[in-house]
Image (cartoon, grey):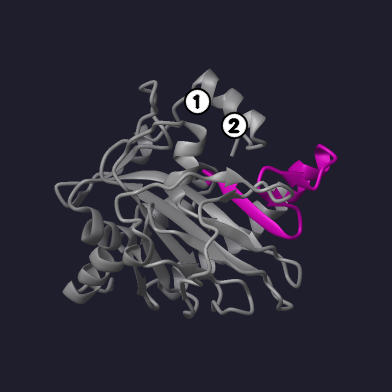
């Protein structure tokens, strides 16, 4: 049974820009996500090997993986992405209309998993599409392992500490990692430690970062992002997925009509120049 999101959690999210929902992913879903994660990491390793490289965009083979928009290649992932747990979470913070915006695996290798710099998720949108104006969307950072400082969990910056609620800061690309960096200050933010099966929910304007994985085990996350409206580029093209999920508070996802829309040529060229796979 899906746990209801309480008023205290809604208030905390509205004030801070993030909230932690502990142990809300059921055992069966957690096992499925771990299984699917292994499949997609293996496929990504093979894809990189075929091209004779260990680095593509912000993915570094064996160290850090960002594997995006693959749920249509899985028989099991849609039941989670568009399932009751995500419906309860997204409607609590976005309202009665929800679209899938993006989904991806975020995985750090054992003992060499890299850090990830301070950034806002909306910062990636504006960096690749300068001038893009959109309502903040919602990130659901789903922990497939117990998360701690040792294995590279995230830290999130409360809105009121940096004034990020309605502001997307300028981001710059970091040489060597290809990360975008949106904050260089000394505030360490709030470290998020939580058990496997928990979800850290935060706004796309919330600054966050993650540390290196220094343990002897992989650190696995499945990240889903949702919006209250279809987000479009400055040219009017659909940005991200824009798949209908909830309307009027009710689940409306229809797998028979869920077909990826072609990516505009200008965006494909920009992503290719930035080292981001157009197939991901």
What residue sits right under mark 1 in the picture?
263
Query: Residue at the left extreme?
Result: 248
Along the polypeptide, which appears first: circle 2 or circle 1?
1
Residue 271, disc: 2
The Cα–Cα distance between marks 2 and 1, rounded to whole angstroms, is 10 Å
Counting labels gives 2
- The front one of 249 and 140 is 140
x, y percentage for residue 37? 60, 59
The residue positioned 61% from the left and 71% from the top of the image is: 152
Q: Quadrant of the N terminus?
A: bottom left
- The front one of 151 and 167 is 167
Task: Tell me the mark number nearer the camera, choosing from 2 and 1.
Answer: 2
Disc 1, SS: loop
Residue 255, disc: none
Any magenta on residue 59? Answer: yes
Q: Which residues are magenta?
A: 45-70
Residue 120 seen anywhere in this rendered image of the structure: yes
């Amino acid at each position: 049974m899906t746990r209801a999101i309480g008023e205290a959690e809604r208030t905390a999210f509205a004030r801070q820009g993030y909230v932690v929902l502990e142990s809300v992913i059921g055992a069966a879903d957690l096992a499925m996500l771990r299984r699917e994660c292994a499949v997609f990491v293996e496929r990504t390793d093979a894809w990189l090997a075929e091209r004779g490289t260990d680095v593509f965009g912000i993915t570094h083979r064996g160290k850090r993986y960002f594997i995006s928009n693959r749920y249509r290649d899985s028989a099991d992932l849609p039941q989670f992405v568009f399932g009751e747990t995500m419906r309860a979470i997204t409607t609590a913070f976005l309202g009665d209309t929800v679209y899938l915006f993006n989904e991806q695996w975020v995985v750090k290798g054992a003992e060499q998993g890299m850090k990830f710099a301070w950034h806002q998720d909306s910062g990636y949108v504006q960096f690749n599409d300068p001038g893009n104006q959109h309502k903040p969307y919602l990130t659901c950072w789903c922990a497939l392992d117990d998360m701690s400082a040792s294995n590279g969990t995230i830290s999130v910056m409360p809105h009121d500490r940096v004034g990020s609620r309605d502001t997307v800061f300028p981001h710059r690309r970091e040489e060597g990692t290809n990360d975008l960096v949106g904050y260089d200050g000394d505030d360490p933010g709030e470290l998020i430690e939580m058990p496997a099966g928990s979800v850290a929910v935060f706004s796309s304007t919330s600054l966050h970062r993650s540390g290196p994985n220094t343990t002897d085990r992989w650190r696995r996350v499945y990240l889903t992002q949702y919006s209250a409206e279809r987000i479009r580029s400055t040219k009017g093209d659909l940005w991200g997925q824009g798949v209908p999920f909830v309307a009027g508070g009710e689940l409306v996802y229809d797998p028979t009509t869920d077909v990826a829309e072609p990516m505009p040529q200008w965006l494909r060229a920009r992503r290719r120049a930035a080292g981001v796979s157009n197939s991901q």
